[in-house]
Amino acid sequence: MSVLVSNRVLSAGRRRHTLMSVRRSVPALYLKSALGTSTFSPKEKDYSIRLPTAFALVAGSLLGGYCLGTSHSNQWNELNKNRELPKGERGCCSCDGASAAAPRREFTEAQRVLPEKLAKIVGKQHVHDGLVQSSKNIQFLKGARLGEGSALAIVQPGTLQEAVKCLQEVVDAGCVVLPQGSNTGLTGGSVPRNQVDRPAVVISMKRLDTHFPIDDGNRVVCLAGCGIGKLATSIQKWFPDRESHSILGSTFLNPTTAAGVAFGSGGVYVRKGPARTDRALYCKVSKNKWGENVVTVVNTLGIEGLEDTDFQEGSGENAVARLDVYAKDVKQGYRRVMAKSSKSLHGLAKSSDVDYQNRVCECTNEVSRFNADTVGEDCNRSEGKVLILATVHDTFPAPSKKRMFWISFPDIETCLAFRREVCLNSPEDLPISCEYMDRDSIDIIDRSGRILTYMIRILGTGDMMGLMWGLKVAIEGLPFSFAPVICDKLMHMFNNWVPSAIPNKFIQLGREYDHHCVVAVGEFGDGNLDRFMDRFDAFVRKYNEKQIESGGKVISFAETASTSEVTALNAFRFVAAPAFKTFCIGEDIQGVSVDYALAKNGGLPPLLDKDAATPLKRMRYSHFGCNVVHEDIAYALGVDTHKEKMRFKHIVEDLGGKLPAEHGHGTEYHAPKETQTRWMKMDPLNVMNPGIGGLPATEKYAQ
């Protein structure tokens, strides 16, 4: 069977690239600070040195945006009239910029006074009107790629107790709840949908960003709003020999740890697996026999002093209140004795996917991970059907030595052989990460992602980058026809004014080959690195000797020579998804995005059927170790992108693949029956994030 690998074909006469083998050690990125194991006191990062650069970028963007927007407003309006959008839900990267109209409905008295009640709980400044979109609230109402709607209110609790009280008030008023983290989701499951039969309230958990270590740093407690980028930085600062549980391609957007557990984050770490924990604090909603709404707090944190059995009935104390006190002390810089896990079943429960290393190395026709997984506590893959308040996560040993390579392959079969024979040969010798990119990915990231790559390299993935992204979202929410696209238009226009964002030795390989892996390997104390390198050397030598004899194209690779090169390669890979959006907007085309898991013994790109529309670009990049693929497909205007996306989903499923793999079902995917049944049991009233995964949005799932 023939396989469509890329829309770009290398010319037969292109010069064969000779083997490059640069082997220089790259020191691990550690912060030279230490923390005693008995006390804990976090400090905020100082960004003052980077502020001038950030303000210069902002000023330049605003000035250029005004000029470009003024001249292109009429042109954009005319173009938008002729753009055929996906049927039903707004499609990924369709770039239409249209706002979903708020439904006309009569609010009950309880609903009319709800915003005032919420303001009394959290403060007036933390409650926003969500019925009319504005630059202030668009970040809560519009999805990163898909979905937008209105909400009766947007509330931002500042404590766990406030979150529980707000949840009670919302359901008592007959509203539905949209739990939200950083709103970086790509499948529409984090924002309101106006077709719901009851008004929605967004409960944004971003203010609850406190996190602290327990068990001498072997684990960490994260309140629901803690961002994974901030968590990674903190752990590196507190314990230079430990690392956080997950790093994603969207780390620079600082998505929350709770959303990672709820929506099924994956990440680039082959050794650690997806975010998963059975130790959490979360809320469920039901009715008692008198018909009253009951918010139940489920406590499986398993921490000494925070177990439900630690509180006398009727004392007025509970785990939520005590965790609030602890978190407040930590946030204010008070030194606290580090907490420990209890000896209960909860304290001994899993706080990471401990079986993942063995599972990913099995060569079977099963997938390594996917979103419809029903294993574990209700917080896992819950997709907003419960309100997560806090989670416990394992930390992991940091490598004592680290090396990173860009490896380019002549064909996908050789690339898959490298994955099987070198990367997944042994659970003990897994690489840190193994990220695949095809030729179209390299072309699009280099064409439309240079500026964003440089911003990540300069600003990092912390608060400043989040501030800049928030500014972009605010600009896109301005009341001008061109506002939703102006930032991406500018980045696309000025992209080629800056040099390539990664060193020339890597980008040249990217332009000469169709298939690439960025592989990071490390030493974890028992010779892992040497064994991996022995297999790497043997594989390249064996393959290249055959190719040289037959006159074929050899495997080529280059190694990073500095920490700045490591940062550059990571940033280049991380901006793939936003670069595709910028490319679609800049080129005035459409695009769809799909994430899916292929069998562990598979990996060939699904073949588009003969009736499918011809794509302009087929951008394919993946977490290569676990065979989770992100595919962004660009089409000309006029193509029914929704139809093409549904067609592609069926092709993947016919091959035994699973959709989605890590972005959540949202409004894009129908979940399997067993997953829907699990969600309905979690949320029998259908008041929590109704309408996800193909479920009805109506009260109690009425048909």
Image (spheres, rainbow, N blue to C red):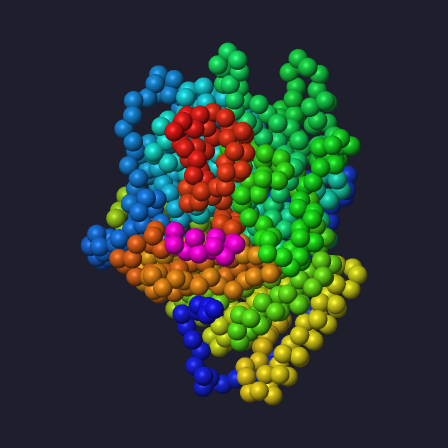
Range shown magenta: 645-657
Q: Position of residue 232 (x, y in %)?
A: 62, 49
- Residue 656 inside the magenta-drawn segment: yes
Residue 254, relative to residue 303: is it above or below? below
Between 667 and 328, the one lying in front of the other is 667
Residue 160, relative to residue 3: is it above or below? above
Residue 279, relative to residue 454: is it above or below? above
Classify residue 137 as left or right of residue 425: left
What is the magenta segment's predominant secondary structure?
A: helix
Q: Residue at x 76, y 42 (%)?
A: 216
Residue 229 seen from this side = no
Classify residue 34 as left or right of residue 100: right
Q: Position of residue 322 (x, y in %)?
A: 66, 26
Q: Position of residue 78 (x, y in %)?
A: 20, 54
Q: Residue furthest top?
A: 290
- Residue 274 inside the magenta-drawn segment: no
Q: Position of residue 396 (x, y in %)?
A: 70, 50
Q: Residue at x 53, y 16 (%)?
A: 288
Q: Residue at x 38, y 29 (%)?
A: 703
Between 203 and 548, the one lying in front of the other is 548
Q: Residue at x 40, y 49 (%)?
A: 145
Looking at the rendering, which quadrant does residue 39 occupy? top right
Residue 164 seen from this side = yes
Looking at the rendering, which quadrant does residue 626 occupy? bottom right
Q: How many marks?
A: 0
Residue 474, relative to residue 641: is it above or below? above
